[in-house]
Image (cartoon, rainbow, N blue to C red):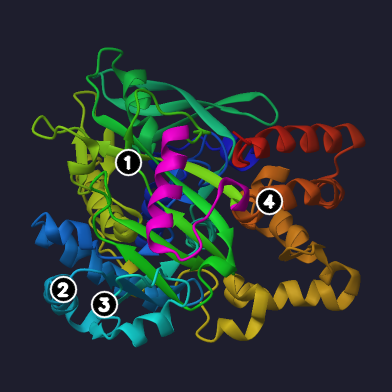
Amino acid sequence: MSRVLARDEPWDLIVIGGGATGAGIAVDAASRGYEVLLLEQSDFGKGTSSRSTKLVHGGVRYLEQGNISLVMEALKERGLLRQNAPHLVSDLGFVVPNYEWWEAPFYGIGLKVYNLLAGKYGFGSSQILTREETLERLPTIKTEGLRGGVVYFDGQFDDSRLLINLVATSAEQGAALLNYARVGALYRDEDGFVDGVGATDMEGGVEFRARAKVVINAAGPFSDSVRRLADPNAASMIAPSQGIHLVFDRSFLPGDSAIMVPHTSDGRVMFAIPWHNHTLVGTTDTPITEPVLEPRPLEEEIEFILETAGQYLEKAPARSDVLSVFAGIRPLVKSVEASNTAALSRDHTIHIDSSGLLTIAGGKWTTYRNMAEDCVNQAATLARLPEKPCVTKDLNIHGFHRQAEKFGSLRMYGSDALAIQDLIHSDPSRGEPLHSALPYCGAEVIWSTRAEMARTVEDMLARRTRALFLNARAAIEMAPRVAELMAKELERDDDWQSEQIRLFEELAKGYLLSDK
């Protein structure tokens, strides 16, 4: 904290929020040469940015809505992400199974348009599949009435791993970033414009102030509460919506292809995708009144996904098959025309309050880089900063490695896998799995605590590794060893370990399904 607390000069930009949008802004601004401070109230990606459907995609749904510009922007950004972070973004084939005679030509034409819009950023050509080809790609698909399918290609990624790599990238570019630093006040200059923040280091309870030429509110679902620090009467911008995902073992989707159901009973697209040797199924769209940091799935959402998945899989998944369930909140921007959240646009919005506070809201993971470029352009103008061009289109993201798959279970770390391998070579016991059901080892805990700002057992098991999201029971069983390893690195005592294990077990229970 001392590096931040000791600073007398104002920062060029202070960013509130350490999710995809905030981290993207920090990368963009720092790589242009601006001085940036980012403050996150919890851990990086604790909210929405670790809870996505794990897809880097143009958005087939938005094509149907006629939002061609958003689809084209997202398809371009999808291509740039694969180019700049090949260790985290990969191609994935999505099969739309056809049970009616009209579905193959109908979806086939739409997906050909989707490919055409991608232009040079395309991931592969869509094709109409025979019944046999569909079953070859999806051996567990329901066979009764199956006529064939359509396959198209999109991107897949690990959301929180990309976020941690964006945090590292921005730090390498000169940004200062703090997790567990809650902003509780906004300060104004004599003209009434926001020129700084008051924040608390949540670990030590130390309060500090930091000044800036412009303050950016990138707090996602919590954007309105930040705006009300400047204006208690600010009208709401955000219409929060909850989506959940269920995770099963790989047997439900043993191939290398995903399933895309274009129309479910609630009008949403549903995906079943292979992810980290498991099967992830989602998502729902449920309007909620207030965002929370740790959203919980609703019973009707769980039933909806189980029922919908059962309509397409030969073996219908049951509650007892669910290894983990997680919920996330979409920070959708309000629209007077839309009657439900599924109809709201995923375009991003930049809003400048009369106090000069700049808020960026909406958007989606895939377009984070473009959102950041737009935001920094606006912020630089507002703060009268010297004009500097955006360089992120060709900026490699930390960990960049073209053949990361050669690192096996460490491939998500990209070039950092070499350092983790060194930790194992110096002490082979660090390479032993922390649990038989998951690939994670002790060396990863040591590395993430030293180099990735992991501060708690939850940080480690939810976002540096994905243990909690893949298998909540296994994650609970891993917690004591993780706490022990982290305590040694952070110089914490036995009481800290016991409290960390208790807190994590309490949290992880919310990722388990109870018997009805």
For the record, the magenta segment spans: 298-321
Magenta highlight on residue 316: yes
Q: Amino acid at mark 1?
A: Asp
User: Which disc is residue 298 wearing?
Assistant: none
The residue tagged 1 is 285
**Of pointers 4 and 2, the one earlier in the residue sequence:** 2
Decide: is 336 above or below 396: above
The residue tagged 3 is 147
Inter-mark Cα distance, 2 to 3: 7 Å
Q: Quadrant of residue 55?
A: bottom left
The residue tagged 2 is 101
**Which of the two residues, 204 or 308, is positioned nearer the viewer here?**
308
2 and 3 marks in contact (CB < 8 Å): yes
User: Which disc is residue 460 wearing?
Assistant: 4
Q: Magenta part mainly helix, strand or loop? A: helix
Magenta highlight on residue 292: no
Residue 18 % position (x, y) = 47, 44
